[in-house]
Structure formats: C-alpha cells, structure tokens
Amino acid sequence: MAQARIDIICETCGKEFTHTKICFNRKEADSYEEWAKENITVCPDCYKEACRKFEEKKRRKALTGNIMKRAWKIAREGAEKFGGSPREYFRESLRMAWGEVKETASDLKGSEKQITWARKIKESALAMLFAGMKPEFVPEAIKLANGKTSAAWWIDNKDMFDSARGVGRAIKG
C-alpha cells in the first residue's frame, strides 16, 4: 500500500488543500499524483457548492417545464369554457400557473431566518415533486403544501425531501 498525497491550490477560491488517495503500490501512487496535479483543480468545498448549484438549476428547470404544461392546460380550459384559441388565453394562464407556485412559498410562520430557510426548502421540494407530477395533480399538491404553514416543520423535515416520493409522503403525512 502506498499513499498518493498532493497539495493543490483551488482555482475557484484560492485555498490550498491536500488531496490523498490510497493506492496498491508506489508506482500507482506516483502515477495518480501526476494525474491529480493536472485534473483536480477545485477544493471539496467549492466542488460541493458547484454540485448544489447544479442540482438547484436542474430542479428549477423541471419546475419551469411543469409550469408551462400547467399554463397550457389552463389555457385550453379557458378556450373550452369561453371559446377561442388556447393561444389567446396563454398569457393570463401563465400568470395563473406562476401564481400557484408562488402561493406555495407564502404564508409561513416563524422567525425571519426560519421563513427564509423554509422557503428555499419548500421551493426545492415542490420543484422536485412537480417535476414528476402530472399537471392535473399540481393544484392538489399545492393545497397540501400550503397546509404546512410552520417554517419549523419544513426545516425539521428537510431530510425527507431527497426524492419526489419522500416529498409526497412528507406533505401528505
């Protein structure tokens, strides 16, 4: 057993950190050190932050896609009820769909810091839930989520929001 150990300066934050890996022999460790000098350029903290931002961007993209589906559904319902083309109703239906989503983040009770943190948790949890949900079930999910008005509840249950199934269970139960 040999240990590869490399001191690297992070390209993102400028912090110096040490990267280590256990290898089977010295030759493999030396080879890994050469590879790591060229390829590992970001410290673990910056890497975690980049991954978190990527996941958040992915969730928001999924939420936006579902909002568009919901908006078109509302537009088609308006066209059926009042006549005309769904395109004529789309602008207002998009506002309504966004309003439904924004409504889910309001009405939290707690300290200012708790509410800020809980809103982030709630938005990302709902984005994950909506990404896999049929548009016709979105209003029901919003009603269930709005029933949870305590910021402390969202913070205490944040670990349940690892998957859409966990979000659904947490909100219903």
Image: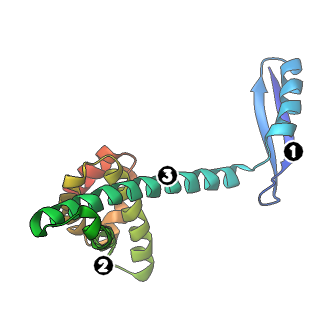
Which mark, by number, is residue 109? Answer: 2
Compared with 66, 148 (above or below) is: below
Q: Element type at marker 3?
A: helix
Decide: few, some or many residues near mark 2? Use Cα within 10 Å; few <14, some 14-19, many ≥20.
some
Q: Element type at marker 1?
A: strand
Amino acid bearing label 2: Lys
> Residue at image x 46%, y 55%?
61
Tell me residue 151's x, y (percent).
33, 71
Q: Which residue is the site of mark 1?
A: 7
Decide: few, some or many residues near mark 1? Use Cα within 10 Å; few <14, some 14-19, many ≥20.
few
Lower position in the chain sequence, tag 1 or tag 3: 1
Decide: few, some or many residues near mark 3? Use Cα within 10 Å; few <14, some 14-19, many ≥20.
some
Tell me residue 44's x, y (percent).
69, 49
Q: Is residue 130 left or right of residue 38?
A: left
Amino acid bearing label 3: Lys
Nearer to us in this view, 135 or 44: 135
